[in-house]
Image (tube, rainbow, N blue to C red):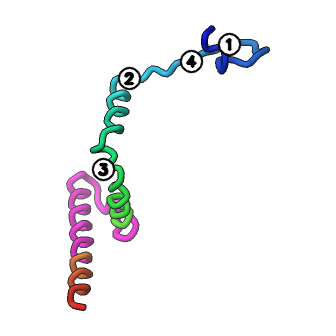
Amino acid sequence: CPSKEGCYKEGAQTKTYSVTIKSHEHLFQKRFQETPYFKEMARNRYKIEAKNAELKQRHGLDVARASGLFNMELQAATTIFVVNMKRIMILIDQKEE
């Protein structure tokens, strides 16, 4: 066996050799992750994740207040509106100082 080293241990009862076969989707994703676009987006992801965490932890977006997709969309929209208004108020206060 050309891959004898690392395939099995001397004195073992059985010998196994495994090769991982990637699907087309996995290969496509692997190539995509090597692109400059993906690397740039990954560098900025922490900002988006921080905002999502704020929406969920501080503003109640972690729990649906009513059932149904429309109600969840309405809850998300109003929560994002409130967070944006808070940000605008902070920026206005900073500008006045």
- For the point 35% across and 38% down, which residue is it? 33
Quarter location, residue 77: bottom left
Which mark's residue is nearer the viewer, 1 or 3?
3
Q: Is residue 6 above or below residue 58?
A: above
Furthest residue to the bottom? Answer: 97
Q: Secondary structure at mark 3?
A: helix
Pick the quarter of the image with the N terminus: top right
Q: Disc 1 and disc 4: Cα gap in Å?
A: 10 Å
Q: Amino acid at mark 4?
A: Ser
Residue labelled with disc 2: 23
Q: Disc 2 and disc 1: Cα gap in Å?
A: 26 Å
Q: Position of residue 43 (x, y in %)?
A: 35, 53
**Closer to the N terminus: mark 2 or mark 1?**
1
Circle 4 residues within 10 Å: few <14, some 14–19, many ≥20: few
Q: Amino acid at mark 1?
A: Lys
**Closer to the N terminus: mark 2 or mark 3?**
2
Q: Is 20 displayed left or right of 25 in the figure?
A: right
Q: Secondary structure at mark 1?
A: loop
Circle 2 residues within 10 Å: few <14, some 14–19, many ≥20: few
Give residue 5's mark: none
Residue labelled with disc 1: 15
Quarter location, residue 26: top left
Residue labelled with disc 3: 41
In this view, the residue in front, 80 or 66, is: 80
Task: Determine the main secondary structure of the stretch shown in magenta.
Answer: helix
Residue labelled with disc 4: 18
Q: Are marks 1 and 3 in contact (CB under 8 Å)?
A: no
Q: Secondary structure at mark 2?
A: loop
Q: Amino acid at mark 2?
A: Ser
Q: Amino acid at mark 3?
A: Met
Q: Is residue 63 above or below residue 94?
A: above
Pick the quarter of the image with the C terminus: bottom left
